Image (spheres, rainbow, N blue to C red):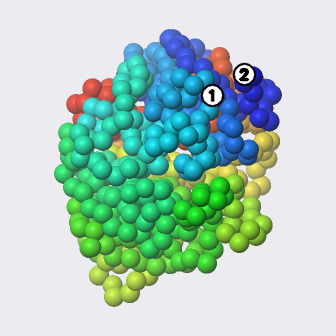
Amino acid sequence: MNIRFPNNDFTSFEAPMRAEIDLDGLEVVQGAVPQHLDGGFFRLIGDRKWPSFVENDVFMLNEDGMASCFYFKDGRVNFRMRYVRTPRFVAEEKAGRALFGQYRNPFSDDSSVAGLSRGTANVTMLVHGGKLLAMKEDSPAIEMNPFTLETIGEYDWDGKVTATAITAHPKIDSRTGELVFFGYCAAGPATTDIAYYEADSNGRIIHEAWFHAPYTCMVHDIMVTQNYVVFPITPLRHELEWIQRHEPAFKWDYTKEVYLGVLPRKGRGDQIRWFKGPNQCHGHTIGAYDDGRYIYADNTFSKRSFFRFFPNIDGSQIEPAHTMPYAKRVVIDMEGQGDGFTEQPLFEYPGELPRIDTRFETVPYSFATMNLLDVPGQERVGGGFQWIATLDVSGKGPSKILYAGHNCSIGEPQFVPAHDEAAEGEGYIMAVVGRHEQMRSELLILDASDINAPPVATVALPFRLRSTGHGYWYGGRQLRGETNLLGAW
């Protein structure tokens, strides 16, 4: 059987790599890696092992998960990359061909894999309770060895998690080390069931609650404070009859209102309170906190889904400007009598993949970093994310913007504190930059206080890394299970 990826000549920067890699002692071509950095910068990318048999496949969402890590110790950086061996990956590896069909559509699969988990584990790497998990929101988590990236298997918190799907965006409470996570379509494809869980600092499930969303849709992320969890229900809708007819699994419905479901932390499903607002699409959480009465929940929002391959529900033409996400603050009055919420813009330029100093997860914060899609008036060559920004969401400090260069692509930036006692935002920003003309990638380590200064270090890779979903820094003590709280050492 001939193996060929459609519409791919293997000269594109984003062509499949299909390679597992071990490379010790990466070259530092500029600056010096801080000697005290001890831990790993974990990233997940999608990288299909076998060509899809589906025409116009949603490649970036429907590819095999490839886990990678830059391991730091004593000023040296090693690199490792491994496929996440999901049940899906193992079945296709044995068959030597693709067996799973359209994105989020079990009705399109080869009959030989009926009932097998379709998860690709290609979005987020989580370390909690000494376990490393690869996550994708439509399936169970996959446990991996944090030091070798070898796959251990599906993980369900010792049978305590019964939801069939688990989010790729859990949150770790910065005060308690508790894990807050959820699953949507938790009872199966295209259901309104949402399951909400909390695990203690040792990884033991201590809370579970189920409720129904107002309509079936993608619920990609949540906003968590000390006292509340906010579930954004925005109308990137998902209906069973669509996938049965082999139509796109998700469509944008501009007729539906947005709902923000607010639950008290460790609350029951029947305690959820729904707040309504104008039609728009949520992206990724920046940060969130509450003062006992008001919830301040920061997220990226666009007029419709960022993903243009999901059509409008009526087949109308997609306006590119409507897909551009902007950072906004949602304010919810938990003592008010109404069911609305207010919005405040946080940043003037469109961007995504926001990150904070996660030592301030669930509590008041000010520092954030994110990638930008456009900076009007600045020259650029190429498309996509080519800028990194830092901003003070309180409005008290200046924002800074770094253009990473022509014909490049930037992965999600990650903040790493300079030391355990560092002030908020004192430390480094790590980001992988793809240099398309040179067909290689590099890891930038920037001073978070001044990203326009020369990099602290530039670590070169002699090959390219495809665009990624998300990346996280985990310090050595986190990897060894000694703490769940972000720290370098």
Look at the picture and state if 28 lies above or below 431: above
Residue 392 horizontal/vertical position (percent): 48, 56
Q: Residues within 10 Å of mark 1 (few under 14, many from 20)?
A: some
Question: What is the spatial separation of the Cα atoms under label 2 and label 1, in whole angstroms?
Answer: 9 Å
Are the residues at dot 2 and dot 1 in contact (C-beta closer than 8 Å)? yes
- Where the C terminus falls, by quadrant? top left
Could you say which is closer to the camera, residue 407 or residue 468?
Answer: 468
Residue 242 horizontal/vertical position (percent): 61, 62
Residue identified by numbered label 2: 1
Residue identified by numbered label 1: 97
Inspect this view and state whether residue 242 appears. yes
- Where the N terminus falls, by quadrant? top right
Could you say which is closer to the camera, residue 383 or residue 179?
Answer: 179
State the SS at label 2: loop
In the picture, residue 207 is in which quadrant?
A: bottom left
Residue 194 horizontal/vertical position (percent): 37, 61
Could you say which is closer to the camera, residue 112 or residue 259?
Answer: 112
Q: Residues within 10 Å of mark 2 (few under 14, many from 20)?
A: few
Look at the picture and state if 230 lies above or below 473: below
Q: Amino acid at mark 1?
A: Arg
Residue located 52% across and 14% down the image: 22
Residue 176 horizontal/vertical position (percent): 21, 48
Left or right of residue 376, residue 285 in this image: left
Residue located 49% across and 61% down the image: 190
